[in-house]
Image: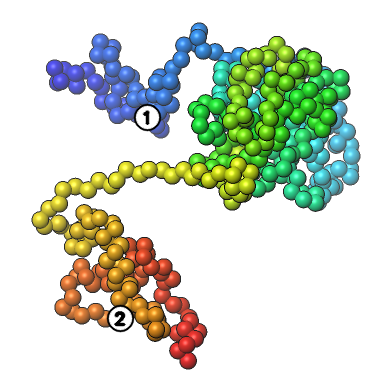
Amino acid sequence: MAFSVLRRVATFRPVGSFVRNRFIAVNEDLNLPAFGKTLEEEMKERNYVDPTLYYKVDIGLPREPFRKRKDVTSERLAQQKTLRADKNFEKLSRYGELEVPVEEVQKEWLKGKGPQHIKEIAEHYGVFQHLFGDAYFFPRVSLDVAYHQGDDIYAPVFYGNQLKPKEVIQEPVVLYESDPETFWTLVLTNPDGHLTKDESEYVHWMIGNIPGSDVSKGEVIFDYLQPFPMKGIGFQRMVFVLYKQENKLDYSKLKKENSGVNLEDRTFSTYNFYRERQNLITPAGLAFFQSDWDVSVTEFFHTKLGTKEPIYEYDFAPPYYSEQTYFPVKEPFNIYLDKYRDPKDINRDYLLQRLENENPFSRPKPKLRFPNAEPLPRSMPSWLQDKVKRDRLGWGRINEVEEYDGPPTDSLHSRFPWTN
């Protein structure tokens, strides 16, 4: 049977500069794949979902009417004609003195492909999936967020840039353009940092019923709370979402007493928040950044929360060693035996060795200037010679009980002044 199957498989015939398999199946009766699957194809097949049950829904603001291609082209041609006629413009460009108006370029970008690009970035970071499930939106409103660092220095929030917790302790400056007669809601949430509940968020800041674009006049539902990514978990996403309200809303049920320090009261779900008000609010703006641990998080837990800081560590599985043999081949005797000893016993041996050579009433012995140049007795076994050399150079387990500075590179008198 095996021979018949092999006969039905043709040998490799190269097509182009790259092929994925050495063989190509030519008999359809065998039900063999024509090519080996790529990783992308394999993951797509494993994560397949029925499109009739799971499909994406646009919950954002409607797109502005398309401009006629003829009008856009005529404007660009008129602008090019104006620039070509400007002799000073060409001179500044040739000498590298031409200043590009970044703000105008950004406005043109937001009018065109900007919302599409921001939406693709947010999908790449999983923002829509973890906040809204199968829903998404195009950020039609440009949301500018920046944290003041002193003087005229600001740390801006873009779309996935990295900011340290010490840079985002105080509430940021938020700017956007809107009709003064409209109302808005601004929410800052963390979908990655809940300490006790899975698939839950912490709301770090929430202001509702903002008249126009004046955030300072909005109704504070939750005071600003600095991000606190725990040590050992990596980066966390902090997401700003701007909602446009149909009218003024009642947020009294969301307000909590002492919400500034009680994390349980700040448990939040963007999915439920929007689902309960989907006919009253529409997501319109988006900005987010990533943050990981620094020393300010420790201070936050001790001073603001009055609790011990949680630290996460990966629990590694114990190393696997094969069964011992009587005669290990091409492996030093001591290193081979140390693999099957308790690491605490090995460290104790090194510690005792170090204590034997230390005397609190005498000066420490200077390190060897050229460790490999010091001769060793010829009668010393090879495995012991290797151990002594490694200890002299500070290689291996000796670093666990002794801080090795390496061999001195300057003169003995300058390194050890008491030798004068």
Left or right: 175 as drawn, with respect to 25: right
* Mark sitting on residue 374: 2
- Identify the residue shown where x is 20% and y is 68%: 383
Q: Nearer the viewer, residue 406 or 338?
A: 338
Dot 2: what SS? loop
Residue closest to the far top: 52
Residue 206 percent coordinates (x, y)? 71, 29
Crowdedness near tag 2: few (<14), some (14–19) or many (≥20) residues, C-alpha within 10 Å: few
* Mark sitting on residue 19: 1
Q: Is residue 162 something that shows in the picture?
A: no
Find residue 105 and report its image quarter: top right
Left or right: 331 as drawn, with respect to 374: left
- Identify the residue shown where x is 67% and y is 13%: 278
Kind of residue sitting beneath label 2: Glu
Q: Nearer the viewer, residue 144 or 66?
A: 144
Give the alpha-carbon distance from disc 2 to disc 1, as whole Å.
58 Å
Relative height, residue 92 to residue 181 (above, below): below
Mark before the other along the chain sequence, 2 or 1: 1
